[in-house]
Image (cartoon, grey):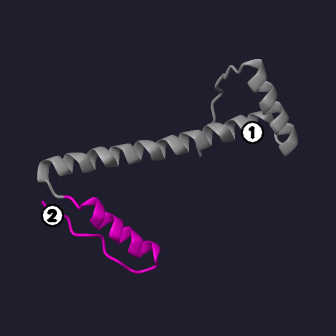
Amino acid sequence: MAVASTTSLKLDPELKERVQQLASARRRSAHWIMREAVEQYVGREEKREQLRQNVLAAWADFQATGLHATAEEADAWLAKLEAGDDAEAPECHA
């Protein structure tokens, strides 16, 4: 089990009041609201960073191989998926 550590967080008075009002409305502590907000933000940003890394890797792969699918091929594939068809992704080509 990880041991929690204390971190100081400075909020401007308006934001602090908003947190306190939300905490009161949700019957939670301001600490809980702030911890939950940080956890959700970090999780979301980690996913964005993973997506960015995946895009960079895909771009590097394309530059190295030239393999790709056209926008039309991708659109047709996505349209089939949207319609509920079990369609395979288009084959990449140079």
Instruction: Name the residue furthest bottom.
Output: 85
Quadrant position of residue 17 = top right
Q: Nearer the viewer, residue 2 or 83?
A: 83
Q: Quadrant of the C terminus?
A: bottom left
Q: Amino acid at mark 2?
A: His
In the rendered image, residue 70, in percent from the top left (x then y), is placed at 24, 60
In the shown orientation, is residue 19 left or right of residue 82?
right
Quadrant position of residue 30 = top right
- CA gap between label 1 and label 2 equals 51 Å
Q: Nearer the viewer, residue 22 or 76?
A: 76
* Residue occupying image coordinates x 46% and y 79%: 84
In the rendered image, the vertical position of residue 2 relative to residue 79, given as above or below? above
Determine the secondary structure under disc 2. loop
Task: Report the magenta residues as a range.
Answer: 68-94
* Residue occupying image coordinates x 70% and y 35%: 34
In the rendered image, residue 78, in percent from the top left (x then y), is placed at 39, 68
Number of callouts: 2
Which residue lies under the disc numbered 2? 93
Q: Is 53 a magenta residue?
A: no
Which residue lies under the disc numbered 1? 32
